[in-house]
Amino acid sequence: MKLGIRICERRKKLGYTQVQLGELVHLDASAICKFERDERQPSIDQLERLAKVLHTTVRWLLHGEGPTEASEEERVGPTTVEHLREDNARLRGQVEELKGANADLWTFMKELLQNLRGKG
């Protein structure tokens, strides 16, 4: 099976039109069409974007080797996944801090209203 057929197969399996896939990888639909017909070969950068969006690997797109469907780590690389995990943990911590700050603010506002009512 050729590269173009593999791109077309994955695109259809995920339910994308050539226009939609093109938008996701920042290319014209005509470029996707040419890739699928093997009239044009994507650059390495384009292959990486295609693999990521099509949930597969560059290796599978080029050679048909390895699993058709790739894990997130295989698609975007272990470093990126680890960064995403670290960012997620940091953001969760910030959310918890904000919850605490909101609770403190809520308590302050209730006490202020009570004091204002008592002095009125």
Image (cartoon, helix red, strand yellow):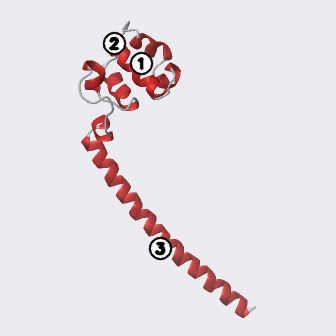
Mark 2 touches mark 1? (CB < 8 Å):
no
Q: Depth check: give the residue in front, 65 or 38.
A: 65
Whole-percent x, y for residue 109 in the image: 61, 79
Q: Is residue 36 above or below residue 49?
A: above
**Residue at point 40%, 24% (across, down):** 10
Q: Secondary structure at mark 3?
A: helix
Q: Depth check: give the residue in front, 3 or 27.
A: 3
Earlier in the chain: of badge 3 and badge 1, it is 1
State which quadrant residue 91 falls in: bottom left
Q: Would residue 14 be visible to someone looking at this image?
A: yes
Q: Would residue 26 be visible to someone looking at this image?
A: no
Whole-percent x, y for residue 89 in the image: 35, 58
Q: Is residue 57 left or right of residue 106?
A: left
Q: CA distance from mark 3 to mark 1?
A: 50 Å
**Residue at point 32%, 15% (across, down):** 3
Please give the residue where the numbered disc 2 appears in the rendered image: 41
Q: Residues within 10 Å of mark 1 (few under 14, many from 20)?
A: many
Q: Is residue 40 above or below residue 98?
A: above
**Quadrant placement of the N terminus:** top left
Earlier in the chain: of badge 3 and badge 2, it is 2
Residue lying at the far top in this picture: please name it.
39
Residue lying at the far bottom in this picture: please name it.
118
Q: Secondary structure at mark 2?
A: loop
Please give the residue where the numbered disc 3 appears in the rendered image: 100
Whole-percent x, y for residue 87 in the image: 35, 53
